[in-house]
Image (cartoon, grey):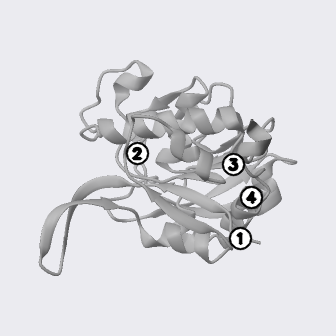
Amino acid sequence: MSRPVIGITAYRDRARWNIWDTDATLVQQSFVRGIADNGGRAVVLPPDDLDADVLRRLDGLLLTGGADIAPGLFGQDPHPETDQPRHDRDSGEILLLRAALDMDLPVLGVCRGIQLLALAYGGSLHQHLPDVVGHTGHLPAEGEFGRHEVSFTEGSLAAGLYGRSAWTNSHHHQAVAQPGQLTVTGWTGDGVIEAAEDPAKRFVLGVQWHPEVSGDDHLFAAFVAACALTPAPPTAREAG
């Protein structure tokens, strides 16, 4: 049996290696490792908002972390602390995500990914958490991870993976404010949404922490397993 093919969203940034100092399509190797070590075949997806046709060749979609989502997408003006928008990522990933949801393709959203899920389901975001919770514990400093306990809803997909609670890492200053039609299934003691899912889908889960850093292989394994169950596309004879 062939491995499930899973698309991992990437971003465009400046990179330097060997003789090169140039624009590049980037994604952390830890995401690729999480998929490959748990039985999947990773395919990197550069920002592209022309169409979502690539999903016909994929068994699942992994939305990675990165720069803040442009506030205009949820009807707000930019906060002084909000990143310079990456419009290419925003438009390309939302296009892929909505199409994947329509196809009932398994989706795992990490950090920025859970925020995209919330927007796709009609929700909104907090642009700067310290204004909401009164502390910087979710992002102590750039490049420094916080640590906190997350409680999970009994019977949820997240609880099935982590139990009633788990300690997770944290490196974000945006977060889900309103989840829209998503079901919130994980939160911190200060009320920040840390996990959300769609129980009507085969596998749609967003987490606010970084499993690729902490090595949460049980999360990647569950996602890859769901992708392995994705029905194969019809052959030309079956379709015609």
* Residue that numbered label 3 is attached to: 106
Gap between marks 2 and 3, in whole Å?
Answer: 27 Å
**N-terminal-most mark, 4 or 2:** 4
Q: Residue furthest bottom?
A: 18
**Marks 1 and 2 in Cβ contact (< 8 Å):** no
Position of 199 with respect to 210 (left or right) is right
Circle 3 Cα neighbour tier, 10 Å, few/some/many (<14 / 14–19 / ≥20): many
Gap between marks 4 and 3, in whole Å?
Answer: 24 Å
Q: Position of residue 220 (x, y in %)?
A: 66, 65
211 or 42: nearer the viewer: 42
Label 4 residue SS = strand
Label 2 residue SS = loop
Q: Quadrant of the N terminus?
A: bottom right
* Residue that numbered label 4 is attached to: 165
Gap between marks 4 and 2, in whole Å?
Answer: 22 Å
**Marks 4 and 3 in Cβ contact (< 8 Å):** no
Please name the amino acid that badge 2 sits on.
His
Name the residue rendered at 71%, 70% in the picture.
2
**N-terminal-most mark, 4 or 1:** 1
Identify the mark at residue 173; answer none if there is no mark.
2
